[in-house]
Every structure is written in C-alpha cells, then in structure tokens.
Image (cartoon, rainbow, N blue to C red):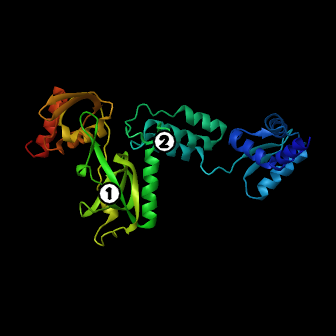
Amino acid sequence: MTDYINKSNKQNKLRPLFILKLLMELTDDESYLTTPEIMDRLDSEYGLKVCRQTIKYDIDQLTEIGFEIERTKGISYQYRYVGRTFDTAELRILIDAVISSKSLSRQKSLALAQKLSSLAGICPSYALNKSIDVNVRVKTPNESIYEVTEVGVKTPNEAIYYITDAINKAISLECKIAFHYFEYNSMKEKKYKNKGKEYIFSPYRMLWDGDFYYVIGYSDKHKKVASFRIDHIDRAPVVLEEESAIPMPVDFDLNEFINSMPRMLDSEREKITIEFDNDTACAVFDRFGYDVNVTLIGNGKSSITVCTAVGPVLYSWIAGFAGRVKLIASDKVMEEYREMLIKALGLK
C-alpha cells in the first residue's frame, strides 16, 4: 500500500511535465487537445485521475515559467503548444540539407531527418516524414568505424559524428589533430594518402561546400592552408592537446579560399560512357555515385556508363582532368563537348 501511495505521489508531482509532453507531441498549428482529452490521456497513459481545474492550474503554471501554450475557449478549453524552436518551413530546409549531404550515409541522413521532423508536432511531422527519401541520393560509403568489444564483437559507431566532434574540440582548444586520410580506387577500396602516414593538421573551420563537408586548416605536410573532406577521414582524429595549432597566416583570406571551392549544377540527362585513369576514381565516384558499375580496361584505366546531366558544367568538369578523364560515348554528347572546346579555344 505504501509503495502505491509513493508511486501515486511521484506521478502527481510529474503531472505538469506529463501534460507538457502530451501537448508537445500531439498538438501543433493544426491540432489541439481539449481538457477532457488531456484528462483521458493522463488516466490511460499515466494512471492519473484529475479534475478540469487541475489541468487549468498546471497549464497556468507551465505558461508562467515560459512555455508557450495557447488556450482557446469553446465548449471546453482547447490547448496547443506553440513554442517550437523551428517552424515547419525551417525544418523542411534543414531536412533537405541533411538528405542532400553526400558526407552523411543513407542511414545517418534518415535518422537525423526523422529526428528533425519529430520537432514539428504530430501533423507536420507526419507530412515531413512522408517526404523523406534518401535512396535517390549519392551518399558516402564511409558508414561507420568499428571497435572490437571485450567479447570480440564488432559494433558500428557513427563515424561522421565522432570525427566532427574531435575536430570541434580541437578548434575550441586551438590545438592540432592527427588523422589518416583515404580516397577510393576503381575497385572501390580505401587507399590511404601520405603513404599511410598520419596528417598533422591545425583545424580552423568546418563548412559545407556544395555536397560535401570539409575542414579547413594548416597542413604540416603541405606547409600551407589546405582542406580535407571530412567523410574521407578514417576514424575520429586524435586531438593533440599538447600541440598548439599553427595560427592562420596573416595574408590568408579564409572567405576567398571558401568561395574558390567549385560547385556543380544540373541540366538535361543523357547516357554517357567515361574512361578514366584509376587514380581519378575517387573524383569520378564523387560525381556519379559509389554504386556505379566499373569496367576495368587495363593499363591503369577503367570506365563507367551512367545516365547523368550533360552540358557545359559536366564538360568543364571532364576537361579539368586534362585527359585523365575522357568522354567516349555517346556520339551526340561527344559532339556537343567537341563544339564547346572549339568555342572555348576561339576556333569558331
């Protein structure tokens, strides 16, 4: 009996929080809960039987300490929670950014998008969830890192979260980090840069550019400011708390550096075949996706056939590899590419 009384007292003390939880989860700009509905929910979900005046008193207390709860008088009072940090349009933008990110895997994008949609309230959340689709996006295959537990079982961890957390910590402490960096070859295998040695790096800032997430800072190896793709950093960097970061060079313009990073646009789609040197495979996969079928040609070359946007942006991208990436089909697209190059050289 004593245990029942203690439990009942505890539930009653938490009653205002239960009411707030119901309003946050079940109401929005289009939905509300009436006093009887709140009473029924408290009874069925928390075993609390309360009167109408108790509901009014608890909600008055919640509004007094700053929670934005709208009250409308009808046959019975109607309540809705209106103090959300983000409105539906803002959440839509954030969700689209998460889904579009190539630095996040499909699983991480989906989980993050669903968390964001849950902030909208019951009706908008349902609508936002219906529109979440990450299957059509090119995503990083750097899904997770693995750690061996005491019983020898490998458990996946969210690599991108651990990596960004370590970089954020180093930026805050103004110290260096150490990490291994990789790209993919034409067999979609990780190939470590810098002969497999760690990069020692002074991070200044992380930013999205186009589809990818980068860290900008001073590279000890390159002896200059450089950028690294965060989803190509292998495992969480080691934060070297005892090594102070190299300050940003006084003649370096961070904004100019950021604005010089290229972006890609879209246009009409055609089926094309591209031949490329194997050491450019990572750039090819970034452009066309990691699930493309690769044909090994030999002599350090491979090819892919894809349906993709064509036009000046694609042609400029191919030309930028100075022959290491070549367009070999279709005839129509090759002719358009040839015409663009002729015009670019001023020969027509």
Say whether residue 300 is visible: yes
Q: Which residue is mark 2?
A: 149
Q: What is the secondary structure assignment of the residue under circle 2?
A: loop
Q: Residue furthest front?
A: 151
Q: Is residue 36 above or below residue 256?
A: above
User: Residue sitting at 55 percent across and 38 percent down?
Assistant: 114
| Residue 99 x %, y % | 46, 40
| Residue 128 x %, y % | 56, 36
Of the numbered discs in the image, which one, if any, rests on residue 169? none
- Which label's residue is closer to the chain start, 1 or 2? 2
Give the left or right position of residue 55, taking residue 101 as reference: right
Quadrant in which the N terminus is drawn: top right
User: Residue sitting at 24 percent across and 64 percent down?
Assistant: 223
User: Residue sitting at 43 percent across and 47 percent down?
Assistant: 160
Report how many numbered discs are placed on residues in the image: 2
**Mark 1 → mark 2, Cα distance in angstroms:** 44 Å
Q: Nearer the viewer, residue 315 or 298?
A: 298
Q: Which residue is mark 1?
A: 259
Say whether residue 55 is visible: no
Q: Nearer the viewer, residue 91 or 199?
A: 199
Q: Is residue 203 above or below residue 139?
A: below
Q: Is residue 188 above or below residue 253?
A: above
